[in-house]
Image: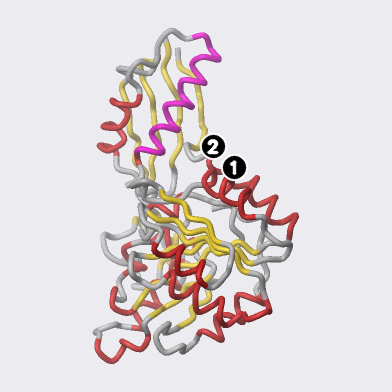
Amino acid sequence: MHEYAVTQSMVKMVVDEANKANAAKISEIRLVIGDLSTIIDDSVQMYFDIISEGTIAQGAKLIFKRVKAEFRCKSCGEVFIKPPVGFDCPKCGGLGTPTGVGKEFYIESIEIE
Amino acid sequence: MEIKVMKNIMHANQKLAQENRAYFRSKGIKAVNIMASPGSGKTSTILKLIDAFGDKAHVAVVEGDIASSIDAEKIDKLGNPVIQINTGGGCHLDANMIKSAVESLALKDGAILFIENVGNLVCPSSFDLGEGIKMVIASVPEGHDKPYKYTSMFEAADIVVLNKMDLMPYIDFDRDSFYKGVKALNEKAEIIEVSCKTGEGIERLAQWMLTTQVSHNRFL
């Protein structure tokens, strides 16, 4: 929902990195996005196309690496992918709690020319 | 050629948030980021708390809103320092907005600063403002499923206020399910039931606000 602001920040970060390396162009940007981060790929792509225009990131291919949300059961310790509804453990029905996996939102690497 | 970046995209915001946090710490200010859906009672809760504090606390308010100043005017009537931030359609407040707002507020040492975020259960949870306390307000008519749908919001909360308790008899609100959801995400969160309409629970909430210790080292 707030992809405009974060895409703006992302473009600035990759352009800064590329400039440090004296690059003429950024051809690829690899992003890691957790399912709990509330960021939607299509929306990032849409804003990227607009915001990157006229920068060395224009035309770069965005690669989205999604990370599923992992929860850990408080009763049996099972680590499981969060079901679409609720946080119940699929093994014993106990209460799951977030492990932190699934909240990622970072730039892994860029490809420059 | 590949360049490894490995940088959080929220980095710029987090850096400013840490600056805000350092400022609040140096002045002993308790900054409270209030997050909730539209209409859940954020402004009403602030008004009730200001009244309940009496002379026990200096309160200043930052009002985040998409476009209007309706809420800020209500606070202003009480004579408390208030500043309005209009995000112009933006769905959340960020650390930079708070930095400029706080500069013009001339906060007293030891004050309580309420920051009313934009009514939204999604985006505000991703933007650290430098606050010491995250307060999430849920209200009975919204239903008990909110923790299950907006996990990040409830996971980050230090305190969850359940407002509009006076409507409980008329609404199919499963209290156990609500508590279970909040506790699954966030074992430590305090849950306080209130009604801004009847005043129920406000005294308890005010006491919690006055006595709770702020963790100035927190990150999101």
Colour pattern? secondary structure
Tell me if B86 is positioned left or right of A64 in this view.
Answer: right
Q: Is residue B142 left or right of residue B60?
A: left
Residue A68: tell me if it is visible: no
Q: Are marks 2 and 1 in contact (CB under 8 Å)?
A: yes
User: Vertical placement of A6 versus A48: above or below?
Assistant: below
Distance between the alpha carbons at the discs numbered 2 and 1: 7 Å
Q: Nearer the viewer, residue B134 or B119?
A: B119
Residue B166 position, x and y percent, is: 35, 89
Specify few, some or many for label 1: CA neighbours under 10 Å numbering under 14, 14-19, or 20 or more: many
- Quarter of the image with the N terminus of chain B is top left
Amino acid type shown at disc 1: Leu
Q: Quadrant of residue B73?
A: bottom left
Local SS, label 1: helix
Element at badge 2? helix
Q: Is residue A6 magenta?
A: yes
Magenta stretch bounds = A4-22
Please say if A55 is above or below B43.
Answer: above
Residue B177 vs A48, above or below: the answer is: below
Q: Residue at x 60, y 75 (%)?
A: B209
Q: Residue type at mark 2?
A: Ala
Magenta stretch: dominant secondary structure:
helix
